[in-house]
Amino acid sequence: MVKLTEEVKESLKGVKNIFLATCSRAGVPNVVPMGAFKLLDDETMLLSDQYMQKSLSNMKENPRVAIAYWGEKGGFQIKGTVTLHTDDQIFKEDVAWVKGIKPTLNPKTAIVMKITDVYMVKPGPDAGKKIL
Amino acid sequence: MVKLTEEVKESLKGVKNIFLATCSRAGVPNVVPMGAFKLLDDETMLLSDQYMQKSLSNMKENPRVAIAYWGEKGGFQIKGTVTLHTDDQIFKEDVAWVKGIKPTLNPKTAIVMKITDVYMVKPGPDAGKKIL
């Protein structure tokens, strides 16, 4: 399992939107901005679904995902494999977290992403380099 | 073929980075920020590859792509199918355009994306709605 470094964790701080890419079984990619995400630990991200349609149906067909972002402290691409939670303790904690930020939001799914790879995305000769 | 509306074209203006999602034949999504893009006409985008690795190998395996962005005037997800150009007039025009912006850049591939679908990505009940 991959553990995020301090550099990657720092770069995520203050980022408002990450872009979540999924892929249907037929091979059609989908990518959307999303704001409700956090690290559960150095190997695991939580993505909270409030409004997903195609992203959710794709993850049910194919659990491989990739996220990318670019903030004030740079950005990375992080790949992983997800499990979907709708009626367990993980989901309850997701609902409590999201409602603590904005009570009107109604999470549908807690998406737990185990991180498998991290890549550089900064333009230049190192773009695409696997760092973790 | 899909023709972008004024609303979608306006939302692209001033956007520095779009996020390009591709998918390998094995179904692994990839997503990266990229800055060298423009509309060729209302049905066609040009993406210029300077540093791509996995995005490029994925597009050679699977021409379906999706881009998403969020700027001052909102954002959308645009899906399409690409052709790759490395030694024709389209590529020459791509090189001239990119070098006109920054002479030190060296385009490797001109990616011509025929637009097939456009979706809303703004958070809320309309997120994921197909508009074109």
Image (cartoon, coloured by chain):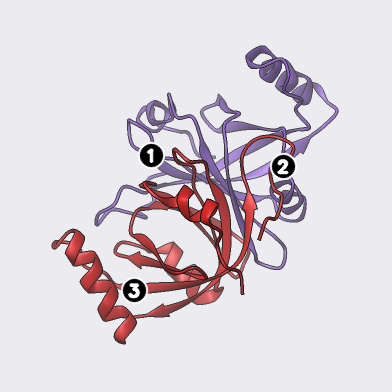
Chain colours: A red, B purple
Dividing the picture into quadrants, the one containing residue B108 is top right
Closer to the camera: disc 3 or disc 2? Answer: 2
Helix, strand or loop at label 3? It is strand
Where does the image place residue A21, in percent across and percent down from the top left? Answer: 52, 57
Please name the amino acid that badge 3 sits on: Thr
The residue beneath circle 3 is A109
Mark 2 is on which residue type? Answer: Asp
Q: Amino acid at mark 1?
A: Gly
Residue closer to the observer: B48 or A25 = B48
Q: Is residue A115 above or below residue B111?
A: below
The residue under label 1 is B75
Q: Is residue B6 left or right of residue B59?
A: left
The location of residue A65, given as percent across then percent down, is 55, 65
How many circles with numbers are drawn on the protein?
A: 3
Decide if residue A24 is in sight here.
no
- Neighbourhood count class around disc 3 (C-alpha, 10 Å): few under 14, some 14–19, many 20 upward: many
| Residue at mark 2 | A126
Name which residue lies at 44% across and 74% down: A112
Q: Which mark is residue A65?
A: none
- Do labels 1 and 2 touch, CB within 8 Å? no
Asked if disc 3 and disc 2 are in contact, CB closer than 8 Å, the reply is: no
Q: Residue furthest front?
A: A6
In the rendered structure, the residue with mark 2 lies on which chain?
A
Chain under callout 1: B
Examine the rendering and report whether any part of residue B91 can be seen: yes
Which one is in front in this view, the residue at disc 1 or the one at disc 3?
3
* Helix, strand or loop for disc 1: loop
